[in-house]
Image: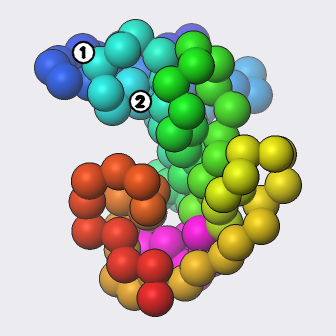
Amino acid sequence: MSESFSSEPYAVEFVDTDGDGYQETTVLDTDGDAVVDTALVDVDGDGYDDVAVFDNVPDGEFVPDVVAVDVDGDGYADVVSDDTDLDGVFDTDSYPAATPLADANPYAAGPFDGS
């Protein structure tokens, strides 16, 4: 089950990925190319996103190269892991200060501060 909302420049869809009836995953097409490039997941079911994954390669497939995690549930990314050479291995970790989880992609326009 999913619900879709579209508005330029991106589309949003809420998805029940594990079949429990709760739409815990939000998938986004943030650049308007009709391909998902961001997924936000509420892992613990509290209604707030805990993990964000970003695909920064416009190749038509969703293969995350950046993963951000909110460890303490405050809505901010605590750790951002980056596959800098796109080999499938996350080789760089950063610890952004006061960056909202959904904005933790270091390659997108936004408030990322990978201190």
Decide: is 28 above or below 107: above
Decide: is 5 above or below 104: above
Tell me which amino acid carries mark 2.
Leu
Q: Nearer the viewer, residue 70 or 115?
A: 115
- Was residue 71 drawn as part of the magenta stretch in this picture? yes
Task: Name the residue at 36% across, 14% down.
Answer: 33
Q: Nearer the viewer, residue 3 or 65?
A: 65
Label 1 SS: strand
Measured from the top left, where is residue 114 in percent x and y?
46, 79
Measured from the top left, where is residue 104 in percent x and y?
43, 62
- Packing grade of label 2 (10 A; few <14, some 14-19, many >=20) is many
Q: Which residues are magenta?
A: 70-80
Left or right of residue 10: residue 57? right
Task: Name the residue at 36% across, 58% down.
Answer: 103
Residue where numbered disc 1 is placed: 6
The mark tally for this picture is 2
Q: Where residue 28 is drawn, which disc sits there?
A: 2
User: Residue 95 sits in which quadrant?
Assistant: bottom right
| Rendering colour mode | rainbow
Q: Where residue 89 is drawn, which disc sits there?
A: none
Left or right of residue 76: residue 23? right
Decide: is 84 above or below 70: above
Asked whether residue 42 is in view, the answer is no
Label 2 SS: strand
User: Residue 71 sits in which quadrant?
Assistant: bottom right
Left or right of residue 106: residue 79? right
Tell me which amino acid carries mark 1.
Ser
Asked whether residue 76 is in view, the answer is yes
Magenta segment's dominant SS is loop
Measured from the top left, where is residue 22 in percent x and y?
59, 32
